[in-house]
Amino acid sequence: MAKKKAKQVKAKAAAKKPARKAGKPAAAKKANGNAVPKPSGKPYGQAGRALDGLRILDFTHVQSGPTCTQLLAYMGADVIKVERPGAGDITRGQLRDVPNADSLYFTMLNGSKRSITIDSKHPKGMDILNRLIKTCDVLVENFAPGALDRMGLTWEYVHKHNPRMIVASVKGFGPGPYEDCKVYENVAQCAGGSASTTGFREGPPLVTGAQIGDSGTGLHLALGIMAALYQRNRTGRGQKVLCAMQDGVLNLARVKLRDQQRIEKGPLTEYSQYGEGVPFGKAVPRAGNDSGGGQPGWIVKCKGAPEDPDAYLYFITQAPVWNEICDVIGEPTWKTDPGYATPKARLPKLKAIFARIEQFTMTMTKFEAMDLFNKHDIPCGPILSMKEIAEEQSLRATGTVVEVDHPTRGKYLTVGNPIKLSDSPARVERSPLLGEHTEEILSKVLGYKASEINEIKASGAITAPKKEEKAA
Ligand code: COA
């Protein structure tokens, strides 16, 4: 009886699914409304990848969207990147280090994907897209506002052709006065509150090297897609997922909105500005290298600084290990001196305390300092240059930094999957050449016959326009 019911559930699920292979539960039963199979008996790491069976129609370009879809590809999704014939993602040709080869900008954001060239404004191109829409689970895009609609791919259109499709977008701003604006990384950092709170008090606002606007929003989008897929298991229908870069940056800068509310009630005592006696204004100030939390921290020089621009250590005067700090740096009287013994008493003296710590750390390299302080459980971290990170063997061993080979540019380093899943080994492969998989996708995924493919080729829907035509 139970078997019969399970069979019916399976048959129902299969009927709803697009005609393609997908991981099917061995014996489905209901848990929280979702079908969950019996636990796999396969050894961990040999039960496929987390997102096997998921197909993404990837309309992303530049950085924010590609970060999202690359991550999904690393986790096993079949990501089909649609690019304009003859041109492709603009980053293929940006910041090139090897002549005529795809740039690192492109290759490091588009690994493990397949590339198909389609002119979405060509009627035959639209036919191909229609088939792709029917066979994919998620459409991801980060065009300028309105561009997808201008292609004819409105939510209503996509949803009508595939009600299960999730349409995920990155935009610069959410609904409001700036919603129609094009946005790049640093604009988002500025509009999301990061730039205003980064840098030194006496200097201008600063943007950070970490791409919190682009890659940060790509990460938010990936999470939104996963949630929408999970809900689809219950509802059977897709939904729109929107991540605005301003919102993504603000989410990462939320501690500063915390401080904005605190500043209205009094000074921010953990900011070194407080200890220096500099009054606070109405908005959260830039705090240099102050730590964002309740444990004061600062960057101190080590042996070699400042000639070596990275010979620095981030040092945190964590209250629970204050006694250990005093002993290690050679100031044992600070343990009991009422002017130093409590975090509150130390606040006005932080600048002098860090100067004393620096005097000590300048006698050793940042790595020696790291070893020494960690022996005493004192939190600190060396400032690692990108060169040091690229050469760090432990990051290679964990697959966080991966070397891949590329047919036109040779070997390059990329950042692998920073999210480690114990039953889903990451698939970190090179990025595709422009249109490398066009024919493969047309025939194997969409079922076009060879004669039809030839017709499409001749129509110009998947090939670059001829030079004369361009000029005309
Ligand atoms: N076939 C035909 N046309 C295509 C195509 C294809 N395969 N792929 C893209 N296009 C067209 C689009 O339809 C659009 O045309 P339209 O404006 O005539 O409708 C055009 O290419 C360019 O799209 P757009 O997104 O406007 O590119 P842009 O280079 O002018 O702007 C951004 C780039 C990043 C500023 C903009 O896309 C944006 O603001 N995106 C949202 C925020 C974002 O993700 N920013 C971070 C980027 S890292």
Image: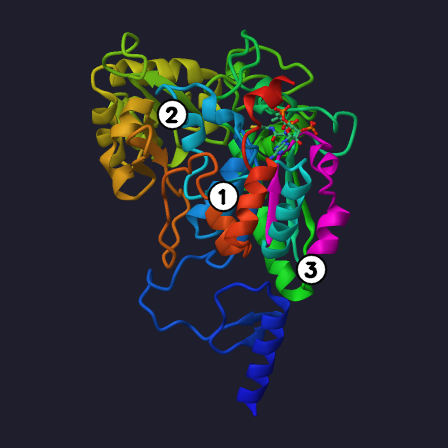
Residue position for label 1: 438
Q: Residue reaching furthest right?
A: 177
Q: Is residue 201 above or below residue 186?
A: above
Measured from the top left, where is residue 254 in percent x and y? 60, 33
Tell me: is circle 3 under 8 Å from ligand 1.
no
Amino acid, disc 3:
Arg
Coloured how? rainbow
User: Which residue range is magenta in the image?
Assistant: 137-163
Q: Earlier in the sequence, mark 1 or mark 2?
A: 2
In this view, the residue in front, 75 or 12, is 12
Along the horizontal axis of the image, is 396 left or right of 297? Answer: left
Quadrant of the rendering where the N terminus is positioned:
bottom right
At label 2, the amino acid type is Ala
Which mark's residue is nearer the viewer, 1 or 3? 1
Residue under label 3, please give it. 237
Above or below: residue 161 compared with residue 129: below
Marks 2 and 3, how far apart at CA: 41 Å
Q: Looking at the image, which residue is at 44% across and 40% down?
A: 436
Residue 161 painted magenta? yes
Q: Is residue 201 above or below residue 165?
A: above
The residue singled out by tag 2 in the image is 101
